[in-house]
Amino acid sequence: MISTIKTAFTTSLRHWKIVLLVYALQLLVAVPLAMQVWHVLEASIGNSLEINKLLPAYDHTVFSDFLNTHGGSITPLIGQLRWVLLVWAVASIFINGGVLFTLLKRTPKWQDFWAGGAAYFFRFAKIAAIFLLLVLLWTAITLLPYLGNLMNSFETMDSEKTVLTYLLWIAMGWFIGVIYLNNAFVVARTAIIEQGLGTWRALKTGLGFALRHFFQITTIFLIFSALQVLASLVYWWVEGKSGMVSGGMVLVFFLIQQALVLFRIAGRFMVLDGISSFFVHRSQSR
């Protein structure tokens, strides 16, 4: 386990070229929406004083008036967001294929990233659709029934603390289920690339393997996720201590933010490499 985690960390660092490429692709997807937001802020919302009334506390009347006044400016953002999400979904499938291919083949070359993303795009698209359906099904089973009766629970249970405690446990169960599905589908994609399995056999392999080795794989996932959370907490602490009090500090914190984004991308590489390497090692040791 320790060697797998160490290898995943070092491998992600050696794939810094792919990390930069994924960063650039994400930036290309985000820029159109960011430009649209900038134009709306500059032309309409940014010149309005109504938003200042919402800063101290939420006021439904003020918020409704704000939407009535600036709804015409916000509507294009919503329309743009739909297309951005669609493009991002397609790009994510391609990126996952390219990244996982380069990690498994230990080849941090841009041309291999493009080749892997193209070769496994359609099979990974099918995998992604099934993953989304299972997550929605799991959400419908766990969260939706309780949330639908949440207001009644406040009236029937003894205290609000009891209601929120139940909600916390249910949310934790939902989160554990989503982690399991994420791990299973990483294994399934790995089985497609490494073993040449078909989609359904790979899914069966992934779901079974992730269940049998749930604690080991989840540990890998949580360790690298904790690193990203820790980096974010350190950033917020530094920002709280210093703040963007000058033009120079704004530039410094902008660069730190971009470094944090790169680290989050590298963290995703670590998770993928850790889980996939664990699966490959166990498969070969049989």
Image: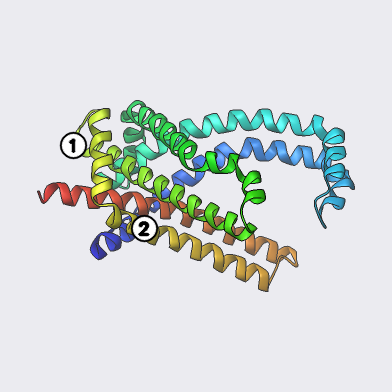
Amino acid type, callout 1: Gln
Instruction: Residue lying at the far left in this picture: please name it.
Output: 286
Instruction: Answer yes or no: is residue 190 visible.
Output: no
| Left or right, residue 113 beside residue 230 | left
Question: Depth check: 279 or 231 in front?
Answer: 279
Q: Is residue 90 left or right of residue 196?
A: right
| x, y percent for residue 244 | 71, 65
**Residue displayed at 36% across by 58% down:** 13
The residue at 86%/52% (across/down) is 52
* Residue density around tag 2, few if under 14, some if 14–19, many if 20 or more, within 10 Å: some
Q: Position of residue 3 (x, y in %)?
A: 24, 63
Q: Which mark is residue 13?
A: 2
Residue assigned mark 1? 195
Query: The N terminus lies in which quarter of the figure?
Result: bottom left
Structure colour scheme: rainbow
- Could you tell me which secondary element the residue under label 1 belongs to? helix
User: Around disc 1, counting alpha carbons within 10 Å, would you say few (fewer than 14), some (14 to 19), or many (20 or more)?
Assistant: few
